[in-house]
Image (cartoon, rainbow, N blue to C red):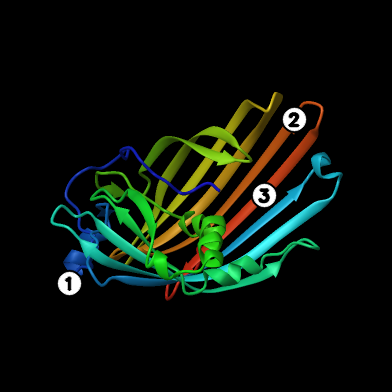
Amino acid sequence: MCGLAVAGLAAGTAGAASSEPPTSDAATAAAADEIQFPIAYEVGQTAVQTGRFTTEMSGSMLGGESFTVDFEMAMTSEVIEVDEDGSGVLQITFDSTEVLEAPDGADLSTLDDLVGVSYTQEFDADGEMGDVELADEDSLTDDQRDAFEEFGDQAQAATVTFPEVAVAVGDTWSEETEIESEGIEIPMTLDYELVALDAETYTLEMTASSEFSDEIQGTDVDGDVLATGTVVGRRDNPLAMSVTQNQAITMHADGEGSLELVIDLTLEADGLPLPA
C-alpha cells in the first residue's frame, strides 16, 4: 500500500514560522500565513484514529471475477519518548478491529488477534519514521505475532513527513520514491501541495502517477498507477491527522491476463473530521 511519504523542499516561501497555536489576534493572522514542519513531538501527546482499508480486485487473471476486502481498525498513538535532538519513540495500540466485507471462504479472523497488541516506532527529528518493534513481545501469543506481521503494516500506511522549510498555501514539493504491489517495485513521483491553513489545522493534497514494467518469475509485467490523497492535521499535535487516499493499479502479465486493484484508505482522528 502506498504510504503518504513526503521528502524534499517546498517550492515557495521560506522563513520563520510557528507550528504552535497563536495567543493573540495578530499572532493568529501571522501563523495562518505559513507553517514550519515538522511539528514538534512532546511526551504525552496522543491521538485516537479509526482506519478503514478497502481493496477491490478484478480482471482476467481472476477469471473475470471481482473480490473486495474491507475492514476497520481503531488505534491509539502516544509519544512516549523525545530526545534532546527531537527524535523519539511512539507507541501504537490496536484498540478494535472489524471485518466489513470479505470474499466467500476468506478467513480474516486473524484481525481479532490484533486487539490489545502494541508496538513502538522510532522517529527522527525531521519526522521520518524508523524501526518498528512489538512491545512486550514475549507476552504475546503466536497468533498475535502472526496477526501483526500480516496486518500491522496497514496502520502505518498514512505516515507523513514534510519539507524542511516553511510553506504557505499554494506551495508544492515532490518526492521520488517506490511503492511495492504484488511483488513489483514501482517508481513514483509524489506531488504535494499545501491547500489550506488556519490557526489550528493544515490541509495537504497529494497526486501521483506512474507507468512501470518488470519481470516476475520469468513473466513480463507492465502497468500503471494513479494515486490521490488528502491530509488534514493539527498544528499542535503531529499524531492528529485525518486522511483519505485512493490508489488504482492496473497490471498486465504476458500470457496471464490483467489485474486491477483499487485501494481506498481513510484514517480519521477523533475531533478532526475526514477531508471533504
The residue positioned 26% from the left and 44% from the top of the image is: 164
In the rendering, at what x and y percent does residue 115 appear? 51, 73
Which image quadrant for residue 176? top left
Q: Nearer the viewer, mark 3 or mark 1?
A: 3
Is residue 199 visible in this depiction of the protein? no
What residue does disc 2 label?
A: 253
In the displayed structure, does residue 23 sit left or right of residue 138? left
Marks 2/3: CA–CA distance: 18 Å
Q: Amino acid at mark 3?
A: Val
Of the two numbered discs 1 and 2 on the same chain, state the one appearing first in sequence: 1
In the displayed structure, does residue 6 sit left or right of residue 226? left
In the displayed structure, does residue 8 sit left or right of residue 102? left
In the rendering, at what x and y percent does residue 189 appear? 48, 34
In the rendering, at what x and y percent does residue 165 appear? 24, 44
- Closer-to-camera residue (94/241): 94
Q: Amino acid at mark 1?
A: Thr
Of the two numbered discs 2 and 3 on the same chain, state the one appearing first in sequence: 2
Which image quadrant for residue 238? bottom left
Numbered label attached to residue 118: none
Q: Are marks 3 and 1 in contact (CB under 8 Å)?
A: no
What residue does disc 3 label?
A: 262
The residue positioned 26% from the left and 48% from the top of the image is: 126
Marks 3/1: CA–CA distance: 44 Å
Q: Secondary structure at mark 3?
A: strand
Crowding near pointer 1: few (<14 within 10 Å), some, many (20+)? few
In the rendering, at what x and y percent does residue 142 appear? 53, 64
Q: Are marks 2 and 3 in contact (CB under 8 Å)?
A: no
Q: Amino acid at mark 2?
A: Ala
What residue does disc 1 label?
A: 23
Of the two numbered discs 3 and 1 on the same chain, state the one appearing first in sequence: 1
